[in-house]
Image: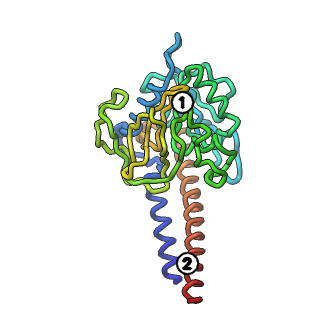
């Protein structure tokens, strides 16, 4: 029994650390090509953006690093620097956006062509009408991974399922999907040339993701699915009802060489990897605890029999 538990521990930790879902930013020796999933994300943001104004396209990027910089907590990663730029800002700039970095959702979103949100804890249910109003005035929105669930219930950890966050019915009319689930495996494009990209039906844009990855289901009839996980759950889609919304479950980092990184970017990289290791280990330990509970129940059942 002890050997079995120890084996479970090693298996879970290994899967967690080396899973693509953890998305550690491995520093490459040479400039890497832009991953197809990141290209798709940028193209989706360009589609969602409202018509360019006199000053061109502008993106408000509500990101993890700035959110944690402005809201430090002993239970969360600590950043001593603002976000100096990352994969998402890189691809947005490639698509012609002027990017503004923030850690919180402001009350007035009208100045921006599109809002891109990755920071879970920047979102609270009180922001739902702010987003709804912005979309109704022609705004565009890009939501990534588990962000939609935080509009449903107030949550400052990763477990929105505990407060009903996986039921997205309350935002169905503007978001386009009514259910959030976890899945994984490979994700493939299911249409040709989405948003005018060179991607083709059948192209793999996410490979071997752990089954704690994000997905949505139960979509409105008007939604257009762009990519799916191998089990048929949705990886990305676009929806235009109250306003233009693009959702994508995940993306691959655009990796830079060390020589291309600024000092702030290198410092950010080190902090980010350190926290992700600690965070993943904590998550895996929790899974181990649940597994041990299950084993104890099974032993009790067998002994009573």
Crowding near pointer 2: few (<14 within 10 Å), some, many (20+)?
Answer: some
Q: Secondary structure at mark 2?
A: helix
Outermost residue on the top side: it is 54
Q: Position of residue 44 (x, y in %)?
A: 44, 31
| Count of marks, rendered view | 2
Residue 31 visible in the displayed image? no
Residue 54 lies left or right of residue 194; in this view the side is right
Quarter residue 61 falls in: top right
Tag 2 near tag 1, CB within 8 Å: no
Where 186 sits versus 262, above or below? Answer: below
Q: Position of residue 128 (x, y in %)?
A: 65, 34
Quarter residue 172 falls in: top right
Residue drawn 58% across the image and 49% down it: 166
Residue 265, label in figure: none
Q: Quadrant of the C terminus?
A: bottom right
Residue 141, label in figure: 1
Residue closer to the observer: 34 or 297:
297
Where 128 sits versus 28, above or below? Answer: above
Residue closer to the observer: 157 or 129:
129
Of callouts 2 and 1, the N-terminal one = 1
Quarter residue 41 falls in: top left
Crowding near pointer 1: few (<14 within 10 Å), some, many (20+)?
Answer: many
Residue closer to the observer: 248 or 8:
248
User: What residue does disc 2 label?
Assistant: 295
Q: Distance from label 2 to label 1 (Cα)?
A: 45 Å
Q: Position of residue 303 (x, y in %)?
A: 57, 89
Residue drawn 68% across the image and 40% down it: 124
Q: Secondary structure at mark 1?
A: strand
């Amino acid at each position: 029994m002890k050997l079995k538990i120890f084996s479970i521990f090693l298996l879970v930790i290994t899967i967690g650390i080396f899973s693509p879902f953890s998305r550690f930013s491995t520093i490459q020796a040479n400039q890497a090509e832009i991953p197809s999933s990141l290209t798709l994300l940028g193209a989706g943001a360009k589609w969602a953006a409202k018509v360019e104004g006199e000053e061109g396209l502008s993106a408000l990027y509500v990101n993890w690093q700035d959110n944690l910089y402005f809201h430090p907590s002993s239970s969360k990663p600590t950043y001593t620097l603002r976000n100096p730029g990352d994969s998402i800002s890189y691809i947005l700039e490639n698509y012609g956006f002027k990017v503004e970095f923030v850690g919180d959702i402001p009350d007035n979103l009208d100045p921006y062509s599109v809002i891109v949100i990755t920071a879970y804890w920047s979102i609270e249910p009180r922001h739902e009408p702010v987003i709804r109003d912005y979309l109704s005035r022609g705004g565009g929105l890009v939501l990534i991974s588990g962000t939609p669930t935080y509009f449903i219930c107030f949550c400052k950890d990763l477990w929105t399922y505990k407060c009903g966050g996986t039921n997205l019915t309350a935002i169905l009319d503007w978001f386009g999907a009514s259910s959030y689930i976890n899945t994984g495996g490979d994700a493939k494009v299911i249409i040709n040339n989405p948003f005018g990209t060179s991607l083709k039906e059948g192209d793999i844009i996410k490979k071997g993701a752990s089954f704690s990855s994000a997905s949505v289901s139960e979509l409105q009839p008007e939604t257009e699915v762009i990519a799916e996980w191998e089990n048929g759950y949705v990886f990305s889609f676009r929806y235009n009802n109250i306003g233009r919304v693009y959702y994508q479950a995940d993306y691959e980092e655009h990796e830079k060489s060390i020589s291309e990184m600024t000092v702030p970017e290198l410092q950010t990289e080190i902090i980010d990897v350190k926290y992700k290791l600690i965070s993943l280990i904590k998550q895996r330990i929790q899974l181990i605890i649940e597994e041990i509970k299950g084993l104890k129940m099974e032993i009790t059942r067998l002994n009573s029999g």
